[in-house]
Image (spheres, grey):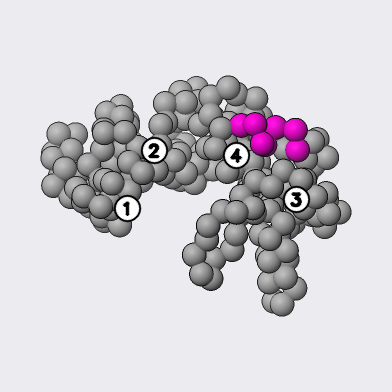
């Protein structure tokens, strides 16, 4: 399929409620409002096609970019390309898929993580803290958790919401996976109160770090 054929197909899959949902969550008008499940089905049809993925990405269209992520080859991207792409993101869903499917699969992810943690670009900073949360959970060797906690305590209340979400994830992961730092992680967010009153559906765990940490630790003890 060509770029234009895909864009026509995406437009035909537009869904009014999905479009409205995206707008509510910060999307602009450059989108069709395609359901994520439909994008996944389409990706299976198109299959991996890195050059086409890059063309789709350049459109800036949200649905095209989400599809692009699913058919892209992470290892074919240079660190400079990743940096440029991350900084061009303007929507949370695109950021999260890009982090999950592209950045986390790239050999330069830790180099970029350190660079992005100090970036003024909110999407780069969001990616940096997302990668940090992953490192904390999987392999924290080489990380200074005390310094990370200091940054979280001093900066988390002041940053943009897009960055705050992944900083909060890093804080929670420190509390969950590192008992030595659990008390301090909980105390930090008790003081900051970030997401204390965040609405959650029945059966879901609050993103408020003290609740999140205690709930996951409790579950781990039961298994």
Residue 164's mark? 4
Residue 40 visible in the current orientation: no
Q: Quadrant of the N terminus?
A: top left
Residue hosting label 1: 36
Residue numbers of the magenta segment: 153-159
Rendered position, 67 above or below 114: below
Residue hosting label 2: 26
Helix, strand, or loop for circle 2? loop
Residue hosting label 3: 190
Task: Find out whether residue 210 is within the magenta segment.
Answer: no
Residue at image coords 54%, 66%:
204
Q: Quick one: label 2 or label 4, which is nearer the N terminus?
A: 2
Q: Marks 4/3: CA distance?
A: 15 Å
- Camera-near label (1 vs 2) is 2
In this view, the residue farthest toward the right is 180
- Camera-near label (2 vs 3) is 3
Image spot of residue 223 (x, y percent): 69, 76
User: Residue 182's image quarter?
Assistant: bottom right
Image spot of residue 114 (x, y percent): 66, 29
Residue at image coords 13%, 40%:
8
Helix, strand, or loop for circle 3? helix
Q: Marks 2/4: CA distance?
A: 15 Å
Task: Find out whether residue 157 is within the magenta segment.
Answer: yes
Q: Quick one: label 2 or label 3, which is nearer the N terminus?
A: 2
Image spot of residue 42 (x, y percent): 24, 51
């Amino acid at each position: 399929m060509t770029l234009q054929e895909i864009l026509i197909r995406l437009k035909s899959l537009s869904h009014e409620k999905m479009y409205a949902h995206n707008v509510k969550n910060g999307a602009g008008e450059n989108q069709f409002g395609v359901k994520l499940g439909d994008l996944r089905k389409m990706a299976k049809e198109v299959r991996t096609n890195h050059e086409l993925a890059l063309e789709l990405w350049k459109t800036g269209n949200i649905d095209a970019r989400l599809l692009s992520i699913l058919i892209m080859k992470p290892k074919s991207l240079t660190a400079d390309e990743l940096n440029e792409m991350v900084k061009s993101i303007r929507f949370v869903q695109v950021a999260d898929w890009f982090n999950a499917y592209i950045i986390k699969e790239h050999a330069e992810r830790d180099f970029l993580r350190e660079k992005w943690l100090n970036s003024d670009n909110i999407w780069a900073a969001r990616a940096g803290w997302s990668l940090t949360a992953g490192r904390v959970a999987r392999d924290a060797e080489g990380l200074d958790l005390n310094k990370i906690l200091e940054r979280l305590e001093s900066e988390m209340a002041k940053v943009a919401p897009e960055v705050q979400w992944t900083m909060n994830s890093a804080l929670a992961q420190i509390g969950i996976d590192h008992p030595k730092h659990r008390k301090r992680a909980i105390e930090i967010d008790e003081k900051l109160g970030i997401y204390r009153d965040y609405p959650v559906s029945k059966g879901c765990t609050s993103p408020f770090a003290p609740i999140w940490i205690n709930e996951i630790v409790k579950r781990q003890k039961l298994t």
